[in-house]
Image (cartoon, rainbow, N blue to C red):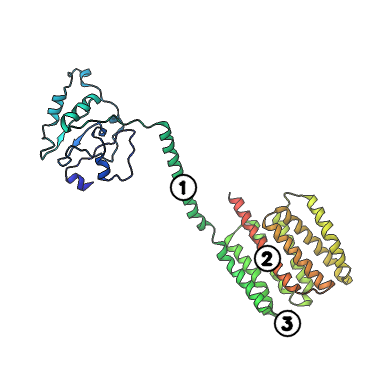
Amino acid sequence: MARAASEGWTRLPIPPGVLLPASPSPAFMKGWPLEFCTPSLLIGPRTRGRAFVGLTPPPQADRRRKPCPSRQGRGTPDANSALSAGARQGHPQGEDNISLGPVISHRVHRTLLGLTCNHEPSPPPPEATRSQIRSLWGYQASMDAGKAGQTLKTHCPAQRPDVCRWLSPFILSCYVYFCLWIPEDQPSWVAALVKCLPILCLAGFLWVVCPGGGYTRLFQGALLCSAVGDACLIWPEAFLPGMAAFATTHLLYVWAFGFSPLQPGLLLLIILACGPYLSLVLQHLEPDMGLPVAAYGLILMAMLWRGLARGGSASWGALLFTLSDGVLAWDTFVQPLPRARLVVMTTYYAAQLLITLSALRSQMAKTD
């Protein structure tokens, strides 16, 4: 624009109803008819009868048609006098600019164009239709929505850390446990640490991704109790403390899942499905182990009931947790099963992961 002004070009206003590109080139602007330039018209020395349309729209007051001077008592304007008054600074063939002055009416405008530039004016530009205005508003709304969506996508990662990145310690610790595969007949603190490490990683995952909130705190307490239970089950003499720790875990899960919706029919189905299995396992227990195992079985069924009622990943986690404990009980008290440890630990870690991920769903629901 500075170079154009130095060479004699003059920026002209854009008439109403004419749409220009964001950055029109000189080649584009040379094709515009001369009469599109309102309310004033300036011709540079090198235009050779052509005009450039500027980028600045006219003020709102200038878009209205100016009153005729004859109504104000100044006489009727004449085309020749208007031309002579506007051509006092020279001619387009000369070195100076020529000003055609304000356009009084469309008829005078056409006359001035014919006298100065030998240009046959084209009809005035059509006004923008309602459909064009509506489409323009729709385009603007879509652009605003796109910017809003881009802003939302920009801020979401800052508000919620990458879930996969913070789950990598859990996956790595599970890999270490299954690769080392320390025999059960060699209990040690190293074996207890390797077994508890994936659960401790899930507790740290909740502390990073879902800080605060009663639901998260209950899950963290349940995971810590599960880690204590895993460590106790390494030693056979600590079986009852380990079972008590897992019973506390299930109670915390029941508290976290809540009792809404209640769904008593679902509880009845769980009792009918798990009751015979529990009674069969109780028949193979010693008398001093019957009551603790029966109490643990009832608590486990309550956790399964609330997990299924909650839905989502919590339901699948509750199902896998129940399957893991069922296989462990049969392998420990009834009859040894082939690859029972692999099935128990695989379903156990998967269950804890799915139940932990349900905390993300709870936090998103509260945020929305």
Vertical side of 131 occupied by 322: above or below: below
The amino acid marked with disc number 2 is Ala
What's the distance in space between the residues labelled 3 and 2, CA to CA?
25 Å
Query: Of the residues tagged 1 and 3, which is closer to the observer?
Result: 1
- 228 relative to 124, above or below: below
Which quadrant of the view contains residue 110?
top left
Q: How many marks?
A: 3
Q: Nearer the viewer, residue 259 or 119?
A: 119
Residue 177 as seen in the image, left or right of residue 49: right
Q: Which residue is mark 2?
A: 350
Q: Decide which of tag 3 and tag 2 comes sooner along the chain.
A: 3
Count residues near mark 2 (Cα–Cα under 10 Å), then give few for <14, some for 14-19, many for 20+: some
Mark toward the start of the polypeptide (1 vs 3)? 1
Secondary structure at numbered mark 2: helix
Please say whether residue 252 is visible from this viewpoint: no
Q: Please tell me whether mark 3 or mark 2 is closer to you in this view.
A: 2
Q: How much space separates mark 2 and mark 1, taking CA atoms?
A: 39 Å
Q: Is residue 95 above or below residue 333?
A: above
Q: Amino acid at mark 3?
A: Gln
